[in-house]
Image (spheres, rainbow, N blue to C red):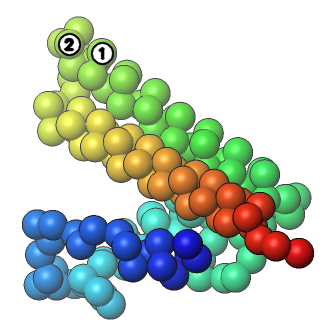
Amino acid sequence: MNTLASIRSLPPLANTVAMPREGAGLGGIRPAELRELTHLTGSAGSTQAKSADGSFSSVLGKMVSEVNAKQGAAGQAVADLQAGKPVTLHQAMISMEEASVSFQLMAEVRNRLLESYQELMRMQV
């Protein structure tokens, strides 16, 4: 199965809202959200994903460390909330959701890279 066929075989997104939000740009995504997504993926629309030293593994390592930092911040927010420190419930929930979404993004990137690698290994030379 090639990459295009695997994308077509994905189930449709359920419970999505098609109406753009106020101040939203293309596709209903706010510019701030787009900046956050490009920050997480390590590229701003370029075809090359390079970090300061130029290696692909450093980009992935940076992404994993950012996800780990978000997980740690979410855990700290929950611990602070339980300890009665001045952390509101919605701040703790937002940090938990940010950590969850960034982890899901990282897992999907990993899955797509693994599928691509397996596809390359199946190619006949």
**Amino acid type assigned to the residue bearing label 2 in the image:** Gln
Residue 59 horizontal/vertical position (percent):
72, 55
Answer above or below: position of 80 versus 83: below
Using residue 88 as the reference point, say whether residue 80 is left or right of it. right
Answer above or below: position of 77 versus 22: above
Residue identifier under label 1 = 79
Using residue 58 as the reference point, say whether residue 65 is left or right of it. left
| Res. 82 mark | 2
Answer above or below: position of 24 versus 124: below
Residue lying at 68% horizontally and 51% vertically, measured from the top left = 60
Q: Quadrant of residue 91?
A: top left
Using residue 125 as the reference point, say whether residue 32 is left or right of it. left
Q: Which residue lies furthest to the bottom in this view?
A: 26
Pointers 1 and 2 in contact (CB under 8 A)? yes
Residue lying at 53% horizontally and 34% vertically, measured from the top left = 68
Answer above or below: position of 99 versus 13: above
Foreground pick, 35 / 121: 121
- The kind of secondary structure element at disc 1 is helix
Residue 96 horizontal/vertical position (percent):
29, 36
Foreground pick, 103 / 28: 103
**Is disc 1 surrounded by few (<14), some (14 to 19) or many (20+) residues within 10 Å?**
some
Q: Is residue 93 visible?
A: yes
